[in-house]
Image: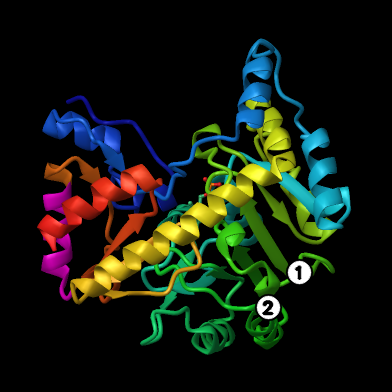
Amino acid sequence: MAANHLRFSKVIDALPATVPFVAPEALERQSGKPIELRLGANESPFGISPKAMEAIRAEAAMGNFYGDPESLELRTALAAKHGISLNQMAVGSGIDEILGWITRAFLDPGDTVVTSLGGYPTFNYHVTSFGGKLHFVPYTAEWKNDLAGLSQAARETHARLVYLANPDNPTGTFYSAQAVMEFIESLPKDAVLILDEAYIEFADQSEVLPLSPVMDRVIRLRTFSKAYGMAGLRIGYAISGPEIIAVFDKFRNHFGVNRVAQAGALAALEDTEFLEMVVEQTRVGRADLAMAAERHGHFAIPSSTNFLLTHVGSDARSSQMVDELLVRGVFIRKPGILPLSECIRITIGTPTQHAKLLRALDEVW
Ligand SMILES: *Cc1c(COP(=O)(O)O)cnc(C)c1O
């Protein structure tokens, strides 16, 4: 008879089985061919700052001890850098983890969340896993988040949370301080805005909304995964009012941020020269790639990130390009939802990688 006695929670049981991200490692295993250019996940091709590497090596020897659950040294450095207080900041194992804290802290089953259609998918997985309902707002014709649309949807659906990535993934588009501030002011007073700034280091810094004064109904999210090149170490942080920051302590995984990541992040913060090099090389590579796209008659969406989204005509065409590049050892990705899925997304590589990429693209385009 062997009845199956396993019982999952109702919310989880109702979710479809899925493998949301096919990693380049999995693609290599499937094809039996090594990936030569890993340009699909916006990981930094410039690696980790040599100074951070030194700190990481030294700290690895202390791996028998748990990390500081308060990440105090790092938080102190970040607070000084951003001109905010310690109780306005929490460190987690990447933005992805913190997005989970936020949904858990704010959502009851059935609550509504507003986000862009085709926007950053990890947030959506968290929302559905806590029984939240997603309300999607399409991007504008200029491939930008529709701020007025998001705000209106938040009012109409009585949303608990609103999500905005700025600069955006997957489009790369960016809103300056004034536009973001007007958006914040237009939101209903009982909604909390998640402002995901994973790519903020790549944006024009004079156009970035200042972190201070900290706003109680806004959660700013930053990470060491992109410009700082530490995606595999898993570390990022949230900045918000003390009430929200304190609530995370009720349930977060207190030892979830490992000590190697904490030490690496601290040293990386100090190596501003390395960061500037990464940002500058990225800017040059991005302009180069955009020119190559336009030479081939494809529209490259202006990007404030370390990747470029390029419109290549159709969903079928973009899928074909992803496959044809993979055959040539180049891993890139494309968005899954129309009309974004008519585009391909390529992470900006080092100058050497770039030369190889452009050769592959010349064949494929
Ligand atoms: C890459 C990315 C993240 C992931 O950040 P981690 O700190 O590595 O978890 C979050 N949000 C956006 C928009 C991203 O593109």
Crowd class of label 2 (few under 14; some 14 to 19; many from 20; radius 10 Å): some
**CB atoms at circles 1 and 2 under 8 Å apart?**
yes
Mark 2 residue type: Ala
Residue 213 in view of the camera: yes
Residue 259 point in image, percent of width and height? 68, 25
Residue drawn at (49%, 87%), measured in percent from left and top?
A: 149
- Place of residue 113 in the rendered image (x, y in percent of width and height, measured from the top left): 52, 70
Q: Position of residue 213 (x, y in %)?
A: 84, 69
* Distance Cα–Cα, label 1 vs label 2: 8 Å
Can you say whether 261 is above or below 79 in the image? above
For the point 32% across and 60% down, which residue is it? Answer: 345
Q: Which mark is residue 44?
A: none
Location of the C terminus (image quadrant): bottom left
- Magenta stretch, residue numbers: 313-325
Eyeballing the image, is 156 above or below 91? below
Label 2 within 8 A of ligand 1 by Cβ: no
Asked if residue 39 can be seen in this view, the reply is no
Instruction: Residue 179: name its quadrant.
Output: bottom right
- Amino acid on which the number 1 mark rests in the picture: Pro
Along the line of sight, the residue nearer the viewer: 273 or 106: 273
What residue appears at the point 56 percent right and 60 percent down from the top-left corner? 202
Say if the magenta span includes residue 67: no
Q: Which residue is mark 2?
A: 177
Q: Quadrant of residue 29?
A: top left
